[in-house]
Image (cartoon, rainbow, N blue to C red):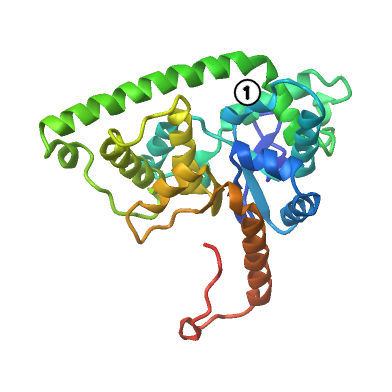
């Protein structure tokens, strides 16, 4: 959730927080929740008032800010219904990995503070009604609507598309080069990308290294797609920092194949959004029942989600 507080040296202090579960919504999930079953959409939005926060990737903004029409209006309405219960995550998993090396907490590793500050500054500058001298009190209650954030990225749509295409080409070339080295020397993979075991505080590092290994091993059997670089980054960040994530079936399969035990998100793909909403509801119900109690480990009662 995005909140603001007074700040000693800046106009205001921006804070992203998760009071319950962090949920990463891939593009397909945003579309299906927005345009699909109205009852499911209503149930998902209701979860936000129970501590669920949405992780939003800027890589989805290009598609969401594309052609306008009734379909687009439904998605915009859905994003606005999310309200302030979201925060932007980094585009590049390497940024998150570097922050893990700096021993930052998981939330600080994935939040894109730069994007959040830029959006806030632009919004204040374009809103004459907001009195700078009265910040943060003068910010409207709906200032941090996710739909408004998406609108702020509309002018960057082509730049985002071009960046994604460039990253896709570079990523494919890198995996091809790694595969070639692996075929020439079978020991190369373990020397350069040894399997990493999960360690708390280094979830993105774990996901990144092991997914690269998997892509190298699968390269001949599965053709790489133009969006794989972006999907790879989203799979790393979503699985590492969310409790629940939505990814397409190919990336769900890959995340599910990573070494266990691990503390990665539970991942759902397209046919299972109903199950995702139901599982989150059950988990929050379980937390409500356990709140204020001391749970003995011998009871065998465990939360449905991490």
Counting from the top left corner in percent of width and height, residue 248 is at 52, 42
Task: Please state if 108 lies on the left or on the right of 127 as rendered.
Answer: left
Q: Between 192 and 101, which is closer to the camera in this rendering?
A: 192
Q: Between 56 and 216, which is closer to the camera in this rendering?
A: 216
Q: Relative to 297, does residue 214 appear above or below in the rendering?
A: above
Counting from the top left corner in percent of width and height, residue 221 is at 30, 37
Q: Is residue 109 visible?
A: no
Counting from the top left corner in percent of width and height, residue 289 is at 67, 76
Task: Give the image quarter of residue 85.
Answer: top right
Please report the residue visible at 67 percent of the width from the left and 54 percent of the height from the top.
52
Q: Secondary structure at mark 1?
A: helix
Q: Is residue 34 visible?
A: yes
Q: Which residue is mark 1?
A: 62
**Mark 1 residue crowding within 10 angstroms, few (<14) / some (14–19) / many (20+):** some
Please report the residue visible at 74 percent of the width from the left and 45 percent of the height from the top.
36
Please report the residue visible at 26 percent of the width from the left and 39 percent of the height from the top.
217
């Amino acid at each position: 959730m995005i909140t603001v507080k007074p700040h000693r040296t800046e106009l205001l202090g921006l804070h992203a927080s998760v009071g319950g579960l962090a949920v990463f919504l891939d593009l397909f999930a945003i579309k299906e929740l927005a345009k699909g079953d109205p009852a499911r959409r209503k149930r998902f939005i209701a979860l936000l008032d129970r501590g669920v926060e949405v992780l939003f990737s800027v890589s989805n903004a290009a598609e969401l800010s594309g052609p306008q029409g009734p379909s687009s209006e439904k998605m915009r309405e859905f994003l606005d219904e999310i309200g302030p219960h979201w925060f932007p995550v980094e585009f590049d998993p390497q940024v998150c990995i570097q922050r893990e090396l700096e021993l930052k907490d998981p939330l600080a590793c994935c939040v894109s503070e730069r994007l959040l500050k830029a959006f806030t500054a632009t919004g204040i500058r374009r809103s004459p009604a907001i009195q700078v001298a009265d910040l943060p009190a003068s910010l409207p209650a709906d200032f941090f609507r996710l739909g408004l954030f998406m609108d702020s990225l509309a002018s960057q749509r082509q730049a985002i598309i071009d960046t994604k295409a460039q990253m896709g080409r570079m990523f494919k070339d890198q995996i091809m080069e790694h595969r070639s080295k692996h075929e020439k020397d079978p020991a190369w993979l373990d020397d350069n990308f040894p399997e990493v075991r999960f360690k708390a505080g280094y979830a993105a590092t774990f996901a990144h290294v092991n997914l690269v290994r998997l892509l190298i091993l699968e390269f001949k059997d599965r053709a790489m797609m133009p969006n794989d670089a972006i999907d790879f980054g989203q799979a790393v960040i979503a699985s590492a920092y969310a409790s629940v994530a939505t990814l397409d079936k190919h990336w769900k399969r890959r995340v599910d194949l990573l070494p266990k035990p691990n503390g990665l998100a539970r991942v759902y793909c397209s046919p299972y959004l109903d199950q995702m909403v139901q599982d989150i509801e059950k988990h929050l119900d379980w937390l409500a029942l356990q709140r204020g109690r001391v749970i003995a480990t011998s009871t065998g009662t465990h939360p449905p989600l991490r």
